[in-house]
Amino acid sequence: KQEVTQIPAALSVPEGENLVLNCSFTDSAIYNLQWFRQDPGKGLTSLLLIQSSQREQTSGRLNASLDKSSGRSTLYIAASQPGDSATYLCAVAFSGANNLFFGTGTRLTVIP
Amino acid sequence: GAVVSQHPSWVICKSGTSVKIECRSLDFQATTMFWYRQFPKQSLMLMATSNEGSKATYEQGVEKDKFLINHASLTLSTLTVTSAHPEDSSFYICSADQDANLYEQYFGPGTRLTVT
């Protein structure tokens, strides 16, 4: 069964800290993996998309890595800010599937 | 580019009535659109996949007669919740593919449905 899991479910950090969010998936045959941000009551904002052939992607203070063999991805946020507070979702496109599989998300709170 | 809109952004309706939600791709044509449902503090669950001009494919456990999906054009898909009940209250999000790439979807801002 193809599943995506995110740990921890919630995380609180003081402003300025670097942090890592984790995503694991059950099948290494993937097409791509994507990290999204969701603010309360809002839709999804795409942060980073990593293709199967890539190992990482960077955008500003965000860095996402992909290790297909271990079925893991991490989202690294440097120098966290209160504005980073949101729920972060990981979504995997498994090869052969016709839809995205979402993790349950990590709710991040950055304390000023 | 690749903007997806939804209308309305929120709606309150009485139990037993029907409500229609629109999903539009504003600057591209979408062969496939997806409808997701998200309950509070939970992740997105795919409800159905709709292809322009054909019947939608529903995920297991989703009632096709209750959640009517119409994908009449390459830029518009609609989800109609028929005979809504309080348990249908949820956040509904649509997404659309671009260039027929099912693996790269663009998401709408969501519609908050509250059934009283």
Image (spheres, rainbow, N blue to C red):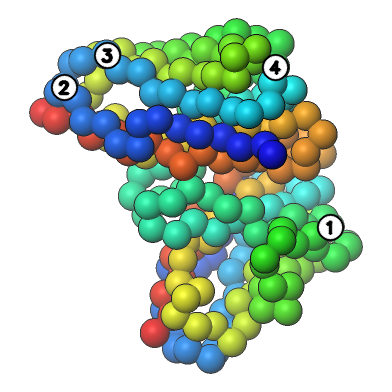
Query: In this rendering, do the residues under marks 2 and 1 share a single chain?
Result: no
Q: Is residue B6 left or right of residue A63?
A: right
Residue closest to the eye, B24 or A27: A27
N-term mark: 4 or 3: 3
Relative to B33, say whether A45 is above or below.
above
Give the numbered dot on residue A18: 3
Labelled pair 4, 1 in contact (Cβ < 8 Å): no
- In three-dimensional space, the C-alpha distance between marks 2 and 3, rounded to whole angstroms, equals 9 Å
Labelled pair 2, 3 in contact (Cβ < 8 Å): no
Q: Is residue B10 left or right of residue B73?
A: left
- Under mark 2, the amino acid is Glu
Is disc 3 placed on a helix, strand or loop? loop
- Under mark 3, the amino acid is Asn
Query: In this rendering, do the residues under marks 1 and 3 share a single chain?
Result: no
Query: In this rendering, do the residues under marks 4 and 3 share a single chain?
Result: yes
Labelled pair 1, 3 in contact (Cβ < 8 Å): no
Residue B1 in view here: no
- Under mark 4, the amino acid is Ser
**Classed neighbour count for the residue bearing mark 2: other residues with Cα under 10 Å, few (<14), some (14–19), many (≥20):** some
Labelled pair 2, 1 in contact (Cβ < 8 Å): no
Q: Position of residue A56 (x, y in %)?
A: 55, 10
**Residue carrying label 4:** A52
Give the numbered dot on residue B52: 1
- Write down the quadrant of residue A68 in the picture: top right
Number of the front mark, 2 or 1: 2
Labels in figure, total: 4
Give the numbered dot on residue B116: none
